[in-house]
Amino acid sequence: MNSVLNQSVVANPKNNELITLFTKVDKTSGEELTYGRVRVDETAWVMQNGYQKEVKRTAFITIDAKILNKFAPLVKEGRPYPIPGKVVVLETLAPQWENHTPKMNPNTNEYVKVDGQLVYRSSNFSTDLSEQDVFIKSTQGVVSEPTSDDAE
């Protein structure tokens, strides 16, 4: 369970914009669609295995361009995201999107594995305040880089 202490919208450090626009081609229709992306930083207290700690998390929220004109005035730097929610961590044994990079141990710079499988981690903004983090307990098996079998 995590309890949000502080949450704020943060400007993109590359262009200082609160909402960064990008385009993507729809694989089905071939149509080029425009979206906006907002960064949310959060500090929360989390409880894992009887151990309470304070963590900092970041999530990126994608917004459909059709509502950007209505929604943009509500997004304020340094303020919580305009829709109540929290950052939730999800770990899986399969990539969650194309070219998803596996989880890396920051102390050793080695990829984390569980029973020979790479672990993939994402941080997502959820409006379900009861949603909980999903962690995979790692085993001793780590490798310095993915093998060709891992990339498939």
Image: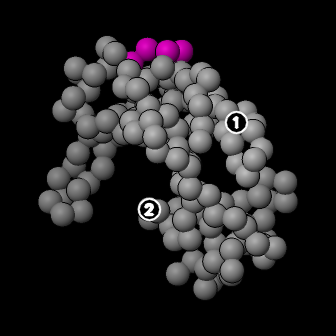
Spot the residue most to the bottom: 149
The colour mode here is: one colour
Image x and y of residue 129, in percent: 44, 36
Question: Regarding mark 1 in the picture, which secondary structure is present there?
Answer: strand
Quadrant of residue 46 within the rendered picture = top right
* Above/below status of 116 relative to 24: below
Residue 83 among those drawn in magenta: no
Residue 78 among those drawn in magenta: yes
Image x and y of residue 73, in percent: 31, 14
**Chain part drawn in magenta:** 75-79
Spot the residue most to the left: 29
Viewer-proximal residue, 144 or 46? 46
Q: Which residue is mark 1?
A: 55
* Above/below status of 107 relative to 55: below
Identify residue type, mark 1. Answer: Val
N-terminal label among 2 and 1: 1
Image x and y of residue 108, in percent: 85, 59
Q: Residue 42, can we see it?
A: no
Residue positioned 54% across, 65% down in the render: 92
Viewer-proximal residue, 111 or 129? 129
Viewer-proximal residue, 103 or 146? 103
Q: Residue 2, can we see it?
A: yes
Question: Relative to 140, is 151 on the left or the right?
Answer: left
CA neighbours of label 1 inside 10 A, class few (<14), some (14 to 19), many (20+)? few
Are dots 2 and 1 in contact, CB under 8 Å? no
Residue positioned 51% across, 30% down in the render: 40
Question: Regarding mark 2 in the picture, which secondary structure is present there?
Answer: loop
Q: Which mark is residue 97?
A: 2
